[in-house]
Image (cartoon, rainbow, N blue to C red):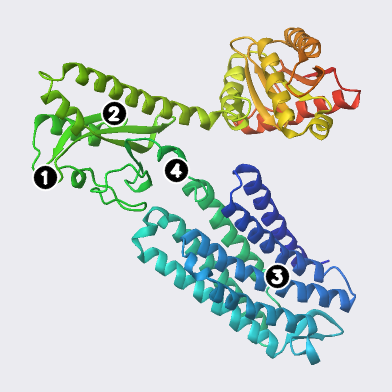
Amino acid sequence: MGFTVWIDLTLFIALFILFVYVFASVTITNLHKVYLIFHFAMMLWPFCQFAIKTTDNPRIQLFYVKFAFIDLSLLTIGWLLFTIFLTGQLHFLRKKISSLIFVPVIFIAIGIIINPNELFVRPMYGGYIERTYGPIFWFTVTILITYAIISLYIIYLALASKKTARIKKQVYHVLQGVSMLTAFVLLDILFNVVLAQSLPGVIPGLTSLGILLSAIFFVIAIHRDKIFDIVTIAHQDIIDTIGQGILVIDDNEIVVEINQALLPQFNLHIGDHFDIEDFLPKEHVSSHLNIFLHTYREEPLEKAEIELFYPDFDRYINLHAAPINVSQIMVGRIITIQDMTELHRLVDETTLQNGFLQERNIELIGIQNELFQTNRKLKQMAITDSLTGCYNRHYLTQQLEHEIMENMKYQTPFTIFLIDIDFFKSINDTYGHLIGDIVICKTVEVITQSLRQSDIIARYGGEEFIVYLPNTSQAQGKLLAKRMKSTVEMNQLIIDNIPHPLSITISIGLLSLNNFTIKQTNNPTIHLNDMFQSVDKALYQAKKEGRNRIVSIVK
């Protein structure tokens, strides 16, 4: 096969690598699912172009040609749907309009599959490696260009709308991707179809290259602009139960979350730009206000608080601004707005109702404590597993990435356990998933009793848990693992509605890292993935050998 045959295969492999990278590096949401399906469709075009050139059978070649163009039609639909989802222009998906979106593609697919009288494509020189196109092809091209124009129109509406100010960077990336793909498809048609007879040969891989470049724009946007990140500072159902008004803004002062308790006089909506000065009463001028504004503007990592009187609606408001920090970098703010009018009224009545005022003050302190506890719980929820209360896998991964580099720097050995509850599926099948959850929680309690204060346990997934033991050699790790396995095995789980105690055993894969001369790299993710794979193999070996045992490896 010639060099041109491998161009499309190379581009397919590049797209596949991007697909695996996105799948492995982000949390899957509904928007992710749309993109991944769309990305998979992008991979099929270069694969089909490569496959056409690997066979001399005209029927198989024709199959790949048809499949490629049907995939290109679906790809264009994917662009359109992804653009609609990302820009939030969901009114384009109303029933009548959404049906019209898919009707042309259905007709195109039927025409391509049937290829009546070779009106879509006809072979040259006895095969379809070189081919000519008919009216159905040009109808298909017209429809696909129309879809691209609609996508560009939706992007224009998004860029012109204030509601999408927070995601304009991402929308610009969509614009670049759509433009790139459209340009390369048109160049492919121009050089390899319209001007095919005038040029000395076919220019391979133009559409495939356009697909790859457009996918690269999206992957850059995913990780640089974080277009799939979901702002979950506080879940709406939780913060709406809090009496204080809560406003969450990002680092560009764009409102990204707001709760129902925010005073109706403050006319703010998600997507609006928040200006602190517009939020303050115009009549209020004091040294306290100047200090508050100085701290808010010049010291963004510091908390700022002030109490203000709003004469327009006769209210005293306590305004508290706290930064949201990630690795000492401010990514936004939580602003709490508390109505203090009632407190002022009580202060004015202290001479007559001192006891009542004291009671109300205690209630106010309780409300403030509730807010503090709620904020603490929200932060804890982000790093813990909701069922067992131990850390989640994301938190442990972040910790280990830092710990690995520190351990390698100072040549400090450490050990990792990967623990699996034996025959857990049979527990679920016999007693139900609620009992299974109880078994998981009680087993975690027993495991935790065997750990030291410095050890970290996290839920790895399902009934699997991972334990990080810092400054621990293989010998020490084996002793801890044996103690843990024995404690779990001897523990009898007494559960309501089950007439007899349950005996649980665990299998443990143990990895000790003592050799710091291998795979020297500054990327902790590479080390972490390698360790997870190794300890997973050890756990698999333990289960393969009969469970209720420990298999250890050393690196």
For mark 4, what is the residue? 236
Image label count: 4
Classify residue 373 as left or right of residue 314: right
Which residue appears at 82% of the width and 70% of the height?
53
Of callouts 3 and 4, the N-terminal one: 3
Q: Position of residue 153 (x, y in %)?
A: 45, 73
Q: Nearer the viewer, residue 313 or 450?
A: 313
Instruction: Tell me: residue 115, above or below residue 516.
Output: below
Whole-Å distance between the Cαs marked 1 and 2? 23 Å
- For the residues labelled 3 and 2, say whether their Cβ atoms are less than 8 Å apart: no
Tag 2 and tag 4, C-beta contact below 8 Å? no
Q: Can you say which quadrant of the picture contains the N terminus?
A: bottom right
| Residue picked out by circle 1 | 282
| Mark whose residue sits in front, 1 or 3 | 1
Which numbered disc, 1 or 2, marks the residue that appears first in the sequence?
1
Decide which of tag 3 and tag 2 comes sooner along the chain.
3
- Residue at position x 21%, y 32% in the image: 340
- Camera-nearest label, 2 or 4: 4
